[in-house]
Image (cartoon, rainbow, N blue to C red):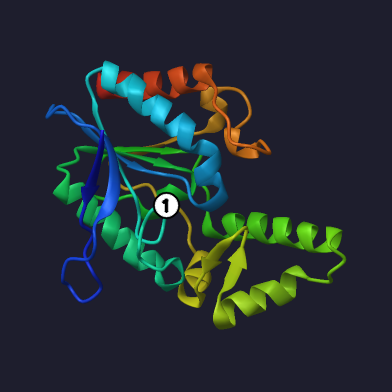
Amino acid sequence: MISTWNPPAPDGDMAGEELLVAFDRGRDLRLLICPAWFDEANKLRRFTLEVMRRLDRAGVDCLLPDLPGCNESLAPLERQTLEGWRAAMTAAAEALRATHVLAIRAGALVAPPALPGWHYAAQSGPKLLRGMIRARTIAAREAGLAETSEALMAEGRAQGLTLGGWTIGPAMFAALEMAEPALAPGQSDLAQSAIGGPGLWLRAEPGEDAAQADRLAGRIVQSLAGAPA
């Protein structure tokens, strides 16, 4: 279940290994998971694995690669770029022989366009930054510090910014300010309203919801069988 994969380095050589969580039985249907990012990755990790378990039982291989700079990665997060992450996910799709993609929240910003699949509750770069900056200003105010969104945005563009313990470099920060998820041919939206209940990323702490995991996995299985998701 726990394996590794090798993302491409910026110079074209192979970079260090990254972790891979996989339900891989060599089946024809192979689903690449582009996970949520930063704090939402923590809140949705259990949910993501529960969806993968359900899809595994339904006959779908599921492949969840770590992006460089995330989780146990030795690559510095502050050096990562949006284009680099897109290239990494495309490389993962090829290396893992993925046939479809499920992009979760901001993961939709790096979903390989060559794969059919789904964007679940896709999140744009600007909304991602606004939420993280709002959380930082609230924490600063509670600590008696004076920080403004405008000043933090300017700092992020100039030298990068640490938000919620995640150090985002200036290149990534600038790219996120303009990044919007785009559906490629064969990809479709799965809104939270289609799953039911509030999104788990809205909770204060990581959690899970078996009913939501059932419905999301069921929608994907239904779509793979030829019915509308």
Residue ID at (54%, 26%):
208
Where does label 1 land, which residue? 71
Residue ID at (42%, 48%):
108
**What amino acid type should be assigned to the residue bearing mark 1?**
Asn
Vertical comparison of 74 with 110: above or below: below
Determine crowd level at label 1: few under 14, some 14-19, many 20+ residues with C-alpha closer than 10 A. some
Instruction: Pinpoint residue 221: horizontal percent, then vertical percent.
Output: 31, 20
Vertical comparison of 162 with 4: above or below: below
- Could you tell me which quadrant the C terminus lies in? top left
Toward the viewer: 79 or 196?
79
Residue ID at (19%, 37%):
99
| Left or right, 107 with reference to 140 | left
Q: What is the count of numbered marks?
A: 1
Report whether residue 204 is seen: yes
Asked which quadrant contains residue 157, the reply is: bottom right
Report whether residue 185 is seen: no
Instruction: Pinpoint residue 22: horizontal percent, then vertical percent.
Output: 26, 35
Is label 1 in a helix, a strand or a loop?
A: loop
| Left or right, 145 with reference to 129 | right
Residue ID at (21%, 76%):
11
Instruction: Pinpoint residue 161: horizontal percent, then vertical percent.
Output: 59, 71
Toward the viewer: 8 or 185?
8
- Could you tell me which quadrant the N terminus lies in? top left
Instruction: Pinpoint residue 64: horizontal percent, then vertical percent.
Output: 32, 41
